[in-house]
Amino acid sequence: MVPHVPPVVPVTLVRAFDPPPDTYGPGHRGIDLASTSGQPVRAMAAGRIAFAGIVADIPVVTVEHAGGLRSTYQPVHATLPVGTPVMAGQPVGLVAASGGHCGGSLGCVHVGLRDASIYRDPTPWLATVVLKNLPPPPSGAPAGR
C-alpha cells in the first residue's frame, strides 16, 4: 500500500491513538488531525470507497485497501459513491461542520484504521510526514471514541 499520504494537509495531530484495554472498553480508536469545515479529505492509500453514509448522525467515508485494511474518515461528507476506485491522495470527501467528537467546528477530522478484527494505529501510515503535536484538549472537552 505505498504510497501513503496524509488525509488532510497540513498534518497536525490533535489527539493520538489510545486503544481500549479490551474489545468493548473506552478508548480512542484512531487519531484526530486538525482540519476545518469544508476541507478536502484524501484517501491515505489506494483502494475503493466501501461506505459513504451516516452512522449515529455522523457522516462517514470508509476506503477499503489491499490486504483487508479499511481507513475511515469522520465527520466527512462523501464526494464519491460507494464502489469508486481511488488512488492515494485522491479526495474522497469534505470535512463536515459538525459530528461526533470531531468536526470542522471543533477543528479536527477523526481517522481510523481497521483490519477484520482490530483497530490499528494509523500514525505509522504517516511516518514520513512530520506530525506537529498540539497541547492536550482543555478539560471538559468531549471524550473520544
Image (tube, rainbow, N blue to C red):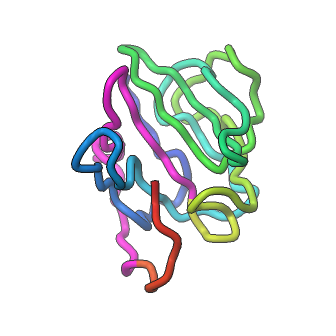
Note whether residue 4 is visible.
yes
Based on the picture, tell me whether residue 127 belongs to the magenta stretch: yes
- Counting labels gives 0
Residue 41 in percent (x, y) is at 62, 45
The outermost residue toward the left is 21
Q: Quadrant of residue 83?
A: top right
Note whether residue 128 is visible.
no
Quadrant (top left/top right/bottom left/bottom right) for the N terminus:
top left
Residue 75 in the image: above or below residue 125: below
Question: Residue, x 75% and y 56% (percent of image)?
Answer: 38
Residue 53 in percent (x, y) is at 72, 33
Residue 126 in percent (x, y) is at 35, 46
* Apparent side of residue 86 relative to residue 28 in the rendered image (left or right): right
What range is drawn magenta here? 109-136
* Apparent side of residue 53 relative to residue 1 in the rendered image (left or right): right
Question: Residue, x 25% and y 43% (percent of image)?
Answer: 22
Name the one closer to the observer, 121 or 21: 21
Name the one closer to the observer, 18 or 96: 18
